[in-house]
Image (cartoon, coloured by chain):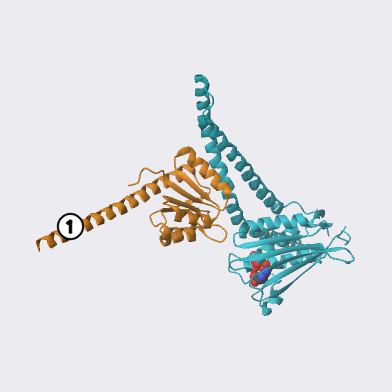
Chain colours: A orange, B cyan
Amino acid sequence: MSETKAPRILLVDDEEMVLTSIRAYLSLETEYEILAHTQPEDALRRLDEGPIDVVVTDYLMPRVTGLQLLAEAKKKQPEAARVLLTGHADKQSAIQAINDVGLYQYLEKPWDNAQLLLVINGAIERTRLLRGLAEKVEELDAAHGQLKEAQRRLIRAFL
Amino acid sequence: MADQPPAITSGASSSLDPEIRQLREKLAEAYRLVALGQLVTGVVHEINNPIGSIVSNNEVSLRALSSLRQKLDAARLAGEAPPQKAIDLVDTLLSLAAVDKIACERISGIVRTLKTFSRVEERDLRLVRAGDLLRDAAKLVDCQYRRRIELQLFVAELPEIECYPQLLSQVLLNLLVNAGQAIEGEGRITVRAAQVIGSEPAAIEISIEDTGKGIAPELRPRIFEAGFTTKPIGVGTGLGLALSRKLIEESHGGRIWFTSEVGRGTTFYIRLPVRQTRPPAT
Ligand SMILES: Nc1ncnc2c1ncn2[C@@H]1O[C@H](COP(=O)(O)OP(=O)(O)OP(=O)(O)O)[C@@H](O)[C@H]1O
Ligand SMILES: [Mg+2]
């Protein structure tokens, strides 16, 4: 597992105000790397640039909803945990969509810092576990491949 | 007639049974509350972000300040210059204070506009800038629709007009909410206001144009009827336009009309005299 790198959190909200507050809180409480964006397009580009542990996004944004963004994020990095911030009014649609985008959690606005951190920590753990598992499976696959190769050579040598 | 609440008086109301008058008054009040209630959802949503920010910032500020205090004390004891971490904390706190200021301004702005609409006691003719009423109404409606509807305001230099501000706000609010409800998905509402050139007596005209679904020709004669609505229960009571017409024509001596094209949109027009010329009732 690549435990060496600090967890990376991708934060998306169309309001700079929200980003500033959450970023300040997380950088005070944690060593996480925070990538914050008001434009969903910029956030999606970030997902092409390297592994992200958690994507936290607002639900209601102009042009793109948080769910559409998370659906895209899921295609780009399926293991990255997805967290949705919702207002009270759109809570219902958020709950309905939990399955569609494989939501890890949703939080209601106004958000509670301690709860947000708890959710993010759980999400990081889950993502790292998934990635670790994927690595192990790959290693196993590689080892299996090597074994197969050795077996083939052995057989060839005796035939 | 100015001594009676204009919301509920018709031309013949002075001869009306007081009980009926009271009922009408209740109805108008109930309608106002419903209209306001619809907006509250949007307003609550609008307040979420600034409140969330302030609460969060406050928590961070308190913690950062105490940590800062410790670091500076430690440095002073050791006779050192302030550590980098302390300087970073100061920067963070400064940025949070800036956000708090914006967040608070936004909340007070919303609360202020909300107050304009819930002021019950204000029933007197006043001189006001129509542009201010339009901007306030637009701001409230914008809370509700801003993510899907673009609201444009073109307000020319306007003379101050003599009116019942709260009642006029109520009309504007209803027309704007109707416009918003007529738009499915994304669209635009354009509000214009200007003085009518060459009009005698002086008058202003306000128009509210939407890119909504329009009104079918066969429904057009009915939309000003009290109780006529095409909206589901819980959304429309069908009183908005009936009341609006009453408030414009009877309370202000103005006119209200509309043009509409199915599939393209609807424009409502209001024409208001700049001065109320009718002699006040004794
Ligand atoms: N801008 C508009 N575009 C399309 N239809 C409209 C528009 N404004 C009004 N209407 C039609 O006129 C009807 C009556 O409007 P009115 O404002 O009186 O009542 P309502 O909006 O249905 O309910 P309420 O205002 O009491 O909540 C509406 O139901 C709608 O069918
Ligand atoms: Mg209406």
Question: Quarter of the picture for ligand 1?
Answer: bottom right
Residue placed at 58% from the left, 67% from the top?
B185
Task: Report the front residue among B251 and B116.
Answer: B116
Total marks in image: 1
**The C terminus of chain A sits in image quarter:** bottom left
Q: Give the class, few, some or many, for how many residues have Cα within 10 Å of label 1's Cα (few <14, many ≥20).
A: few
Residue furthest bottom as drawn: B218
Answer whether residue A100 is visible to the viewer in this image: yes
Q: Is residue B13 visible?
A: no
Q: Amino acid at mark 1?
A: Ala
Q: Quadrant of residue B92?
A: top right
**Percent x, y for residue A106?**
45, 53
Q: Chain of mark 1?
A: A
**Secondary element at tag 1:** helix
Rendered position, B122 above or below A158: above
Which residue lies under the disc numbered 1?
A: A150
Q: Which residue appears at 28% of the width and 52% of the height?
A: A136
B183 lies above or below B86 = below
Q: In this view of the protein, which residue sits in the foreground, B249 or A114?
A: A114
Q: Please provide percent x and percent y for residue B177.
A: 66, 63
Residue B186 place in picture, x, y as percent: 60, 66
Q: Is residue B244 left or right of residue B275?
A: left
Residue at figure coordinates x 55%, y 57% from the top left? A61
In percent of width and height, residue A96 lies at 45, 61
Figure quadrant of residue B36 = bottom right
Q: Can you tell me whether the CB of the residue at mark 1 lies under 8 Å from the nearest atom of ligand 1?
A: no
Image quadrant in which you'd find residue B223: bottom right
Where B256 sits versus B98, above or below? Answer: below
Question: Closest to the observer: B4 or B153?
Answer: B153
